Image (cartoon, rainbow, N blue to C red):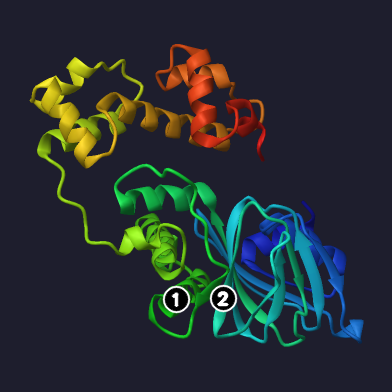
Amino acid sequence: MDSTHSRAAETNTFVTRSIEEASHVLSEVYYDLRLEVRGADAQDFVTRVNMADLGALTVGDVSFGTEIRTGYCEPGFYHVCVPLQGGFGVQEGTAAPVHTTTRKAVVYDPARDISVYDWSPDCRVLAVKVDKLAVHRQLETLLGKPLGRQPRFKPYMDVTGGPGRSWANLTRWCLLDWDIPHGLLRQPLIAGRLEQTLLQGLLLATDHSYRAQLEAPPPQMRPAAVKRVMDVVRERPEVAYDAARLAAMGQVSLRTLQEAFRKHVGMSPMAYVAEVRLQRVRMQLRTSPPGSATVTNVAYQWGFAHLGRFALRYRARFGETPSQTLRTP
């Protein structure tokens, strides 16, 4: 990392007229991107970035001073761009191009190549990178059950009013407070709660494949026996449970527990144990530094004794092998 980026990391601001420096810093903060100046007068190019690190979210106020074109391959993160001035066009993969303005933000898909064009010279955006797994975990929390499929987001978010405007305003406040010495965002308790609020707010402010379920009436409260078992399993999923032991923890008969789980959770108690374990394995594989973990060790750590069955179940659940997850940057 060069000294220019080091200063940016310390002050959370960055200004340069160098395309190479701008590309390097933006690639470090966001994604490995290509940056091309398209304006008639290249002398107008000046990159200004003000950013804040909120854990699962990286928030930046970004402008270039002239027309540019950029893009990156499958970012692996959700990304929301809220134009504060001007606008730009964007194309995800082979989908139809869309254009965003100060009235509507754009939401990028983690698994599609992104091309940005027609960036107006006055364009200034609130660019928010959001960790994909963190979004999925918050969605599971709101739904009260594991995700059957990954959510699919529509490309636009209305920021003229309602939850979309609230989310954009709260995100902008983070940038303002980040520059205050000893401000509230420097307090881990506040920062953690705000991070969770922004993640949940994004799910409530955007249109996606689970939106109808989020807006549906809350499900019937789970029986105390089911809640007791779920709480224990989430706390210690690696323990060698069996159905009889789970029933004893719930203080009900095995048949009663099985029927209650199928009605209120949508799966058997042991299937729930396996689901929690699979989620923990996936999270650890995705977040382990290179060379620090093996699939075998992680699987054993979370209670999978039969690697062959584990690998089959993992691939059926996530659509890839554990080794592929471990290699994913």
> In the rendering, which numbered label is found on residue 136?
none
- Indicate the position of residue 49 as horizontal and vertical percent values: 68, 72
> In the rendering, which numbered label is found on residue 105?
2
Q: Residue at x 55, y 73 (%)?
A: 156
Whether residue 296 is situated above or below residue 176 in the rendered picture: above
- Is residue 219 or residue 251 the one in the foreground? 219
From the viewer's perspective, tell me whether residue 79 is left or right of residue 28.
left
Q: Which residue is drawn at 41% across and 77% down?
A: 166
Mark 1 or mark 2: whose residue is earlier in sequence: 2
- Is residue 128 or residue 99 the one in the foreground? 99
Quarter where residue 71 is shown: bottom right
Q: Is mark 2 on a helix, strand or loop?
A: strand
- Indicate the position of residue 152 as horizontal and vertical percent values: 52, 57
Whether residue 190 appears in this view of the structure is no
- Please name the amino acid that badge 2 sits on: Ala
- Please name the amino acid that badge 1 sits on: Gly
Whether the residues at callouts 1 and 2 have beta carbons within 8 Å, the answer is yes
User: Label 1, label 2: how many angstroms apart (C-alpha)?
Assistant: 9 Å
- Indicate the position of residue 187 as horizontal and vertical percent values: 39, 59
Whether residue 309 is situated above or below residue 4 in the rendered picture: above
Q: Residue at x 60, y 67 (%)?
A: 51
From the viewer's perspective, tell me whether residue 178 is left or right of residue 205.
right
From the viewer's perspective, tell me whether residue 100 is left or right of residue 161.
right
From the viewer's perspective, tell me whether residue 290 is left or right of residue 307.
right
Give the residue pinned by disc 1.
164
Q: Which residue is drawn at 31% across and 15% down?
A: 240
- Is residue 185 or residue 130 the one in the foreground? 130
Quadrant of the rendering where the C terminus is positioned: top right
Quarter where residue 232 is shown: top left
